[in-house]
Amino acid sequence: MKLLLGNEAVALGAYEAGAKVASAYPGTPSTEITESLARFDKDKIYVEWAPNEKVALEVCIGASMAGARAICSMKHVGLNVAADPLFTASYIGVSGGLVICVADDQGMHSSQNEQDSRHYAKASKTLMLEPSDSAECRDFVKLAFELGEKFDTPVLLRLSTRVSHSRSLVEEGVREEKEIKTYVKNPGKHVMMPGMARLRHVLVEERTKSLIGYAEEAEINRVERNGSSIGIISSGIAYCYAKEALGDQASYLKLGMVWPLPEKLIRDFAASVEKCYVIEELDPVIETHAKSLGLDVIGKELFSPLGEYTSNAIKKAILGDSGVDKASGELPALPARPPVMCAGCPHRAVFYALKSIPGLVVCGDIGCYTLGTLPPLAMMDSCVCMGASIGMALGMEKALGKEQAKKTVAVLGDSTFLHSGITGLIDIVYNKGAATVIILDNSITGMTGHQDNPATGFTIRKEPTRQLDLEKLCHAIGIDNVAIADPFDSKNFLKVVKESLGSSDPSVIIAQRPCALLKTAITSDRYYASEECIKCGICLRIACPAITKSDSGKPVIDKNQCSGCGFCANLCPAKAIKLV
Amino acid sequence: MPSILITGVGGQGTLLASRVIGNAAIREGYDVKVSEVHGMSQRGGSVETFVRFSKGKVQSPIIDEGGADILLAFEILEACRSLGVLRRGGELIANTQEISPMPVISGQAKYPEGLVESLEAMDIKLRTVDALSLAIEAGSPKAVNVVLIGLLSKSLDFDLETWRLAISESAPARFLEANLKAFELARAAG
């Protein structure tokens, strides 16, 4: 038995099920699935980071059509990007099993919204399983491959932050090699033009009926009987909370398959208890289904569609008392501790430079640099989805006129640019925009924990590969003004930004400086504030977590937190910040 | 069923601590669930991870308000912030180290004074330690997490060898010597 993350258990299950191809774009909380798969033997399973989720899914659809088992992983918003292939993959079905892991983020620990991915299973008319712990993660992935091949459908595996990032005990098995099915040319199944797709749609509707039949009998939809006063219908992590809260005081219908939903099973369970509750985080998917069957169940009347549930809240809602007896006492007001850019982070220098330009609008994007929104830098105006910064900057210019381009920049990371920014940049060139785009090239995908991408020159297995040249790419798109500048060289960087803003042609600035957490960026240099300090306060305005103000007004640099980047020393007008 | 909440500042090594405790609990024959925090929340913000173990089956990986038997706090302000998760009469093991959050650094707020005194007046078992000094004495400021595990080991009925094995297995080999020394120093101190 091993104590594995849900994500590690998903990877283990896929490996043991004989999966041959895995593709993904990193996204919290799904990233470790693919990272874990890359630790298995490369002769047994091919694993890659794709530039985005759409490509990742297309790679896996291709592998499945070729006859191999394939697994694709993403966070909930990644499935928006991959939705296009998903809906048609549903018509095509599979040859080798195709499992699509999608990790929701109830509570938005690391996301821009908390959409409920079950709607995608319903809308794409596919099959969705939802495990509650790591052991189920492993088992359900294996089952997902089997069911997908049996019913000729891609299978979604719904995860959540608390399942993906919790560790629990998992039994390890052995890999079962799956023979690759012989590829047969079959346009009627694989070419979805109207004439073929109309026929496939009929099969999809029939498939849903068969899947409902399976759901009625499926072992993973199980009833746990504890009397008849309270009944709970639940799935995933919400089931764990319910079980923690109510234990043997309730009977449970635990649904391991969350789409399509059984009818008779739910009807019979609801009829067997006096009061039936549906406990599901986010949207009332099971509840709506039960109510459409005419069943008297209680759901969102008691439980919120927002955020995560707790077992205390469930206990209180159903039993009337949460029984909480917690430590308490008088405490002074506690200042908040929002996440911050690390000491030595190059993004800090970019936002510090932008802050000196009055009236500048910064269309932002998804990554560590989103933290540039928070005070004291407070320099980001928007954050919507991967790559949105570029299109939005163009939209502002088109709405407010050409002059706006002199007061607007789009800021996004290298990996985000490759994910979904390239098409936005093409739009700027094609439609004669003049926007300035700053690509924060920190040589890695940072926020999700250091994954390689096409611009790093390495694959997921750290094998060298052709490195994408951002400068050449921007030139090829039609951007003539491409500047590469080091944001820590603050004077030059600001000069480049001002020149780009002043130009009536579109510009790209590649702000090049590795992530402070990369091994290549780590130095033993440390700085301290000397007696020559004139207390001007500039170093305190860069939002470095290593620099605090002492009672005398002088800065103090914590040598345990200082990364030795020297940005504060460069800014110091008195040259008072010195190397230890 | 012991439930342990680990709280601290992103980057302090709370994740590793939760893995060591989880690993040790398995060695002692418990069912275990550990809940970790990845992504955005790790960037210098407040971080909470949970470890729960039981001779029966652990259901939820999460510890709710009033549900923790032990609160292992890597930073004193975070100890106070997470206090409501500790049950009345529970044990708080707190590193007295102060790490200024951004509102303090940028001058919008002051780091509160007298936190330890406030905690001492409460209905909890309080043990404080200057874990950073002990970690540096052991050879690495990064060993703060193992210092705290050393203190925790005195509150749990696990074999000493279990802890040593869990530390060696969960932490990088190059820090092993400093980590094991940090563990011993913590046990001697607390």
Image (spheres, coloured by chain):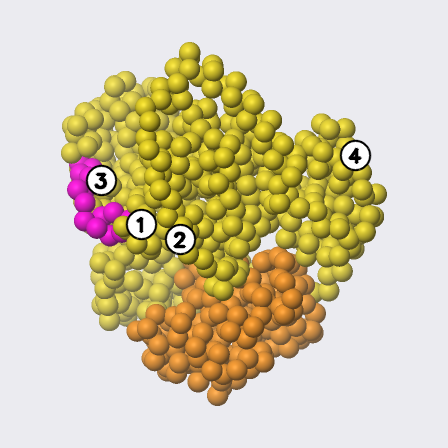
Chain colours: A yellow, B orange
Do the residues under discs 4 and 3 have CB atoms within 8 angstroms? no
The stretch drawn in magenta includes residue A488: no
Label 2, residues with CA under 10 Å away: few <14, some 14-19, many ≥20:
some
Task: Write down the residue under mark 3.
Answer: A510
Stretch of the chain drawn in magenta: A458-471
Residues tagged by mark 2 and mark 3 found on one chain of the structure:
yes
Do the residues under discs 2 and 1 have CB atoms within 8 angstroms? yes
Q: Earlier in the sequence, mark 4 or mark 1?
A: 1
- Looking at numbered disc 1 in the image, what kind of residue is underneath it? Lys
**Can you tell which mark lies on residue A296?**
4
Q: Earlier in the sequence, mark 2 or mark 3?
A: 2
Residue A353 versus residue B32: which sits nearer the camera? B32
- Looking at numbered disc 4 in the image, what kind of residue is underneath it? Asp
Q: Residue at x 35, y 42 (%)?
A: A179
Q: Is residue B49 visible?
A: no
Label 1, residues with CA under 10 Å away: few <14, some 14-19, many ≥20:
some
Spatial CA span between label 2 and label 1: 10 Å
Task: Write down the residue under mark 2.
Answer: A175
Q: Look at the magenta stretch and give its main secondary structure.
A: loop
Residue A288 occupies quadrant: top right
Do the residues under discs 4 and 1 have CB atoms within 8 angstroms? no
Spatial CA span between label 2 and label 3: 45 Å
**Left or right: where does residue A17 sit relative to residue B51?**
left
Q: Where in the figure is residue A281, as x and y percent of width and height? A: 62, 43
Spatial CA span between label 1 and label 3: 38 Å
Using the image, name the chain to which the residue with label 1 belongs: A
Spatial CA span between label 4 and label 3: 59 Å
